[in-house]
Amino acid sequence: MAENEEDLTIPRAAMNKMIKEILPHVRVANDARELILNCCTEFIHHIASEANEICNTQQKKTISAEHILGALESLGFREYKHEAETVLKDCKAVAAKRRRQSTRLENLGIPEEELLRQQQELFAKARQQQAEIEQQQWLEMQQAAQHQLMLQQQNSKAEDDDEY
């Protein structure tokens, strides 16, 4: 639960964006913005409370869209109900579209077994490339070590020659 009234409001940035979209050529004073914000918050609280009552009456545990639509009607906001139904229909369409897009792999027309085979092939190729890189690094380290050893032997021989 929220601890104070500030936790129960619509974010101001979101409200300001809505006001600009709805009234692009109108300046709205800060106190008017605050009043709009408080009215929207109270409206949402009022509708949610009524929807919760409807939900409880039906012995349900989750408030559904139908409960919200019922709350609009029972509170005397029938004129909003049709628009809310339209928004609900649009939201369901967007959600369905997202679900369809989330199954893009299924729409590729490539069987899952083939996709798995291609994935395994790519993994094998990546492992082979990594092994080649590691082999090349190992060879370079060996050459560097041999070169260092050769230089040490030459220095040691030069020091021995200087002693005589």
Image: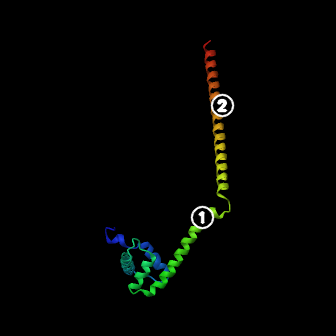
- Tell which circle, 2 or 1, labels the residue nearer the N-terminal end: 1
Secondary structure beneath dot 1 equals loop
Mark identifier at residue 103: 1
Q: Is residue 150 visible?
A: yes
Q: In x, y percent, where is residue 54?
A: 38, 78
Give the foreground label among 2 and 1.
1
Label 2 residue SS: helix
- State which quarter of the image contains the C terminus: top right
Quadrant in the picture for residue 75: bottom left
Q: Is residue 4 above or below residue 132?
A: below
Residue depicted at 62% across the width and 33% down the height: 141
In the image, taking residue 142 as reference, residue 10 lies left or right, namely left
Q: Position of residue 147 (x, y in %)?
A: 65, 28
**Label number found at residue 143:** 2
Which is more toward the observer, 91 or 115? 115
Based on the displayed image, in which of its 4 quarters is residue 80 positioned?
bottom left
Q: In the image, 48: left or right of 130?
A: left
Q: Amino acid at mark 1?
A: Thr
Which percent across, then down, holds residue 62? 41, 71
Of all residues, the one furthest to the front in this rendering is: 59
Which scheme is used to colour this image of the protein? Answer: rainbow
